[in-house]
Amino acid sequence: MSSGLTTSLDRGVMTLTLDRADKRNALNTAMIDGLAQGMARAELEPEVRVVVIRGAGNDFCAGADLGEMLASVDNSLDENERDALGLGEIFLALRRLPKPTVAVVQGRALAGGAGLALACDIVIAADTARMGFPEIARGFVPAMVMTLLRRSVTEKRAFDLVGTGRLVDADEALSLGLVSRVVPADTLDERAAEVVAALAESSTTAFALTKQLFTELDGMSFADGVLLGARVNALSRSTPDFRHRIQEFLS
């Protein structure tokens, strides 16, 4: 059975494409398992320098497969928690991966699909994209995505989004902090490729340290953040990549 996910690796860029266009790339168990395998490979293989997540067809991802969700209503609490953690582990893997991750968003990115985009380091959206968290309207809770959303936008704006379930266009998503960049839809592939190519050429050690520091600053006091930054600064100076790139720049 198809996983609903296609994987490619080209010039250091691993692209994971959600490939259920007829279902608006809704996330089912097979697809989540495929994402987990892709993330494990990205972490283990040094030739992978950047991970890109995108959707086939007109949409990025409509969220969870509602057919699978409905079939789970008679499962035990423990069974459903384990099932939910499948996607949660993808969010965690994207955050922990010491390599850049990029979501390329066209069309709709909803619910868990919006969460998948937010879990990436950079979100590049077409100007026709729309994002939202409509779970409550379906009697469901935007649960795990709430952690990602609260780190991206203010409390009032986050609650507005999950409480009303309204969809926002790309420009509002940018102003809210849900996406990193908005580009014309007809240039999405080209502009995303430029960003990804630049990331693939960046220092792997410097990026890994930057991402780790960025993550660890969550909830840290100002003073502790500065002290941790000093330690990371010192550590980065000891890496071979730092020496090589500085010498190259000065030559």
Image (cartoon, rainbow, N blue to C red):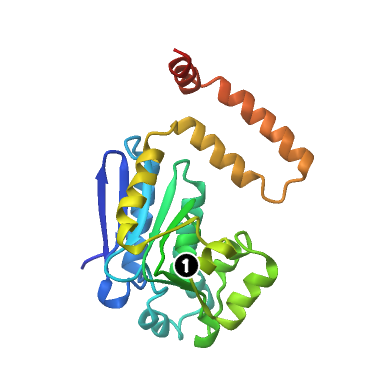
Taking 70 as reference, is 110 above or below it? above
Q: Residue 100's image quarter?
A: top left
Find disc 1 in the rendering and name its residue: 170
Residue 141 is situated, as x and y percent measured from the top left of the image, at 56, 78
Secondary structure beneath dot 1 equals helix
Residue 43 as seen in the image, left or right of residue 230: left
Please report the residue visible at 62 percent of the width from the left and 30 percent of the height from the top.
Answer: 232
- Which image quarter is the C terminus in? top left
Q: Residue furthest left?
A: 1
Residue 102 is situated, as x and y percent measured from the top left of the image, at 42, 52
Q: Residue 83's image quarter?
A: bottom left
Please report the residue visible at 27 percent of the width from the left and 69 percent of the height from the top.
Answer: 57
**Of residues 184 and 25, which is closer to you in this image?**
184
**Of residues 52 and 144, which is closer to you in this image?**
52
Taking 249 as reference, is 141 above or below it? below
Please report the residue visible at 37 percent of the width from the left and 48 percent of the height from the top.
Answer: 51
Q: Amino acid at mark 1?
A: Ala
Residue 107 is situated, as x and y percent measured from the top left of the image, at 37, 71
Residue 130 is situated, as x and y percent measured from the top left of the image, at 44, 72
Taking 69 as reference, is 232 above or below it? above
- Which image quarter is the N terminus in? bottom left
Please report the residue visible at 25 percent of the width from the left and 76 percent of the height from the top.
Answer: 22
